[in-house]
Image (cartoon, rainbow, N blue to C red):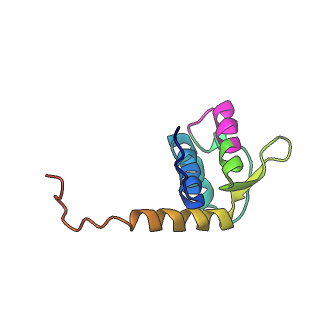
Amino acid sequence: MDTKQYTQEQEEIARFAKALGHPARMAILYFLARQESCYFGDIHEELPISKATVSQHLKELKEVGLIQGEIETPKVKYCINREKWELARNLFVGFFGECKCKDISCCD
């Protein structure tokens, strides 16, 4: 029986990583991050992604907390959730900063 316990931080970064694990979600986040305020409109008109696909990916991004707003018509408004965005950024910076290998070719 596997009794490994993962830290809350490990579980949270894994949820963020899963949410970032699709190019459509990355395109949506990139688009929203470049907006100066909440975006009102249909993202599928801005990105080369179908309406059904955008809807599915917005739902997943909202569930993990990276975006906020109304994703159901007629109230179509979304933006980056700054608090979760900052948390994810700090988790990834911390994670990628953990590598102790200083030699670029340590595995060669």
Image quadrant of residue 88?
bottom right
Question: Does residue 81 appear to the left or right of 73 in the view shown?
Answer: left
Residue at 56% x, 61% y: name it.
Answer: 9
Residue nearest the observer in this picture, 83 or 102: 102
Residue at 71% x, 64% y: name it.
Answer: 37
**What range of the chain is rendered magenta?**
48-59
Residue nearest the observer in this picture, 95 or 86: 95
Question: Does residue 31 appear to the left or right of 77 in the view shown?
Answer: left
The answer to whether residue 54 is magenta is yes
Residue 103 drawn at (x, y percent): 18, 65
Question: Does residue 64 appear to the left or right of 17 in the view shown?
Answer: right
Image quadrant of residue 33?
bottom right
Q: Can residue 27 be seen in this view?
A: no
Image quadrant of residue 79?
bottom right
Instruction: State whether residue 47 is above or below residue 105.
Output: above
Residue nearest the observer in this picture, 60 or 48: 60
